[in-house]
Image (spheres, rainbow, N blue to C red):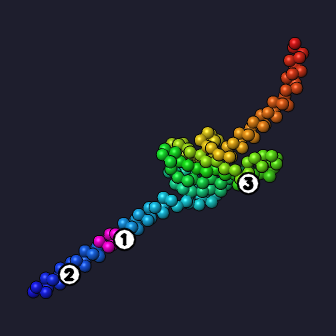
Amino acid sequence: MKNEIKFKKVKQKEGWNKVIITIIIILVAAILFSLFYTKYEKDCGQDQICFNSAASICRPAKLLIDKEGSTFLYTIKGNKKDDCIILIKIKELNPEYDLETVQLLENKEMTCAIPKSQLINSDFTEKESVIDYCTGPLKESIYELMIKRMYNVLAQNMGPILNEMESVI
């Protein structure tokens, strides 16, 4: 009888050990899955709906898209406080642009810290005001190009303006 009691206790211990090991395995698997899922970058290819869906929850993803003959790469890096960090890169500029524009913009990127509230229910890739949240070589090059173009317009119109001023004086 004593042997039966010992045998039952040994069996019960083995049963609890199996349960504990099973629980540990499930917990480790759940932790590994959640780490992988939150860091895994989804490749949306050219699917803007997929990318915008990921952007609305700031989930790592990337999108390679063609806009008016230029190729852009958008990469969601993840959260930083109340912002979503998104990288924007011009991979290839439309060959119709002049050489100066291509040299200024092609293969440049900028990092954008966009408030998550701006990304909910919106088409991120169509937002024009996103540059206000960005920093980096691409943004600097865009501003440099704008200044050069404004200067050219001003220089071209300066002659007629001066002639008109002289006629008034």
x 77%, y 51%: residue:
94
User: Which residues fall within the magenta stretch?
Assistant: 20-26
Q: Position of residue 79 (x, y in %)?
A: 50, 50
Q: Earlier in the sequence, mark 3 or mark 1?
A: 1
x 17%, y 81%: residue:
8
Taking the magenta stretch, the answer to whether it contains residue 22 is yes
Q: Are marks 3 and 2 in contact (CB under 8 Å)?
A: no
What's under tag 3, amino acid-wise?
Answer: Glu
Q: Earlier in the sequence, mark 3 or mark 2?
A: 2
The chief SS type of the magenta part is helix
The single residue placed furthest to the left in the displayed view is: 1
Instruction: Please determine whether, in this image, residue 169 is positioned above or below residue 88.
Output: above
User: Residue 10 bears which disc, if any?
Assistant: 2
Q: Which of the two marks, 3 or 2, is nearer to us in this view?
A: 2
Residue holding disc 1: 25
Instruction: Please determine whether, in this image, residue 46 is positioned above or below residue 10.
Output: above
What's under tag 2, amino acid-wise?
Answer: Val
Residue holding disc 3: 92
Taking the magenta stretch, the answer to whether it contains residue 48 is no
Instruction: Please determine whether, in this image, residue 129 is positioned above or below residue 54.
Output: above
Inspect this view and state whether residue 28 appears: yes
* Label 3: element kind: strand
The single residue placed furthest to the top in the displayed view is: 169
- Quadrant in the rendering for residue 127: top right
* Label 1: element kind: helix
